[in-house]
Image: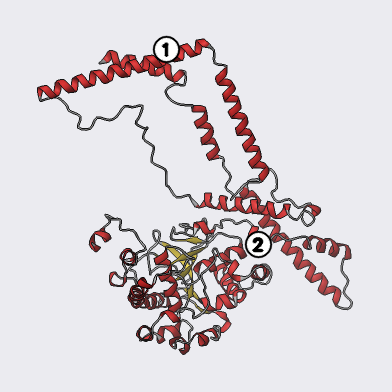
Amino acid sequence: GPALEAAGGVAEMVARSLNLSGGDDDDDDEEGEKRDTGTHGEGEDDDDDAAAEEKKEQKEEEEEEGKEEVNDDDAAASASAKALVDAAREAVNKSESEEGAAGGEGGGGRVDAAKPADDKTRPPPKPAPLRAPPDPDTLLARLNTRRLYHRHRHYRARPETYAAHGIVAVPPNKTVEEIALGEWEFLLEWQRWRNTCVIMKHKREQKGQTIDEDKFDRLYALISKPRLPTKYELLLFSPCPMAVAVLASYPRSGNSLCRTLFERCSLRVSGSDMRGGLIEHDLVGEAAVSTNRVQYVKTHFPERRGTPAFHARRVVLLVRNPFDAIQSYWNLMVTNTHTNTAEFSDEQKELAKRHFAEVARKEIQVWKNFHEYWLSQDIDLLLVRYEDLIRYPAKVVRKIMAFTLDVKNLATFFGPRVDRVIQEEELEKLGSYKPRSGGIGKSIQNYPPELFQEMTHGLLHILKRVGYTDDFVIPDKTLWEKDEPLREYAYQWDGTPPAEGEKGTTIVINGGPLVRTPDLDTNWRNVKQSLGLLKDVKCDCARCRAGR
């Protein structure tokens, strides 16, 4: 035994030195390097692809030439080492088989129940893939890198607009974070130039006022240069000296659209107390709630609980009428996507209607409890409606920005930013993903009269508290579309002011009980299985065992 182990160890050592037993380590290292240094963007230029392909072909040719130049002595040494490894392996296998036979005859030896096949035919075990979710810093670097790539393509397609003015897509010798910070500082400076030009122009129009014409012309030339589209601007994290402001909403009430508008206007990453499927839609602040990163955080609490508890100083309560919100929530849970609509065959439609009615009866109670919870909190709160956000986006976003940032006047900087972002593209293109049909009242057709009447029982009181009129208990889509916006596009309540020497009032998010109690919860796995949307794969979690 010891002699065989020693011989095998020497043989393996010789084989490794000649690259016979471990494979081509250089190739593995190079492949790993390619994976590590791959671009974060969605693609590469055609020139880069061609260069990479040419480099690969050149490397293959060099390997073929290297193989032909192996001399006879190296070949003989390789054959000798390989023979030594095979002989040692054969001796070990023979010794083990003899020990197994002797043990079987004696009755007290070890017997292998399932002897593995020959090592040459059995593939080596593959290591388990690493599935740790990326951290927010990595996600932000990927997003900004992708935006720089698209900016480069945008500039290259318009040389007469950008290259003619000496504008480059990517400044040299700077990190992505340095580029983003530099552009933010330039944006502030650009706004100061703009304000100065406005003042000088006003003075010129007034009788008896004189201005520096040369300075005016220089500043006007600077602010007249081509502006970068907002979708190519880079984002930053924003350390906040106080507790964050949260964007609270029942699911499917326009939370993602509101976050995207905030990010476009402020160029700051918004956070979330959940790690959902929005990372792929460029909302990179998932699971970021700390004040050293973000100051505007999404939450669905107390409908569900996200990350560990954290403190919030202000709340933006985003409300959507319950019928449209519940219908959208049904599509989300059935399709597992934010964009697809559930479609059923003729055989499935009746069963789907029964399931939807059961879900709607539960969710209307969750919707009521959710908003009653937030309206009862003693904290600064701004209430805005989804229906106003999609019809008057600039007005509503101005209210949200002023409340979240705790500023009285947005006219000097953020006001123009909001107007530019809203006017630059159509609203449906500003969201993080292409929404479903959306609109106001399009879900009414999915509620039979009996179900609609049952859901509106006792609903009017809370509807009025969150800004809806009596028209929303009438199943008429045209009445809902004509609904007037909230007065000044938002309602605002101030919490109890802090005592002298104390900090402002805060509230704990993700602490305390949930409004979605067990009797209001839905086993979505069973629903999808009954509708034929999920394969019958047995799960061993506690909920599935209880369902079976």
What residue sits 47% from the left and 72% below the top? 253
- Percent x, y of residue 271: 50, 60
Residue at label 2?
230
- In which image quadrant can residue 209 be found? bottom right
Which residue sits furthest left? 107
Residue 507 shows in this picture: no
Q: Which kind of residue does numbered mark 2 sit on?
A: Thr
Q: Which kind of residue does numbered mark 1 sit on?
A: Ser
Q: Is residue 524 left or right of residue 463?
A: left
Residue at label 1?
80
What residue sits 48% from the left and 84% below the top? 468
Dot 1, crowdedness within 10 Å: few (<14), some or many (≥20)?
some
The vertical placement of 377 against 91, above or below, is: below
- In which image quadrant can residue 392 be found? bottom right
Dot 2, crowdedness within 10 Å: few (<14), some or many (≥20)?
some
Q: CA distance from mark 2 to mark 1?
A: 67 Å
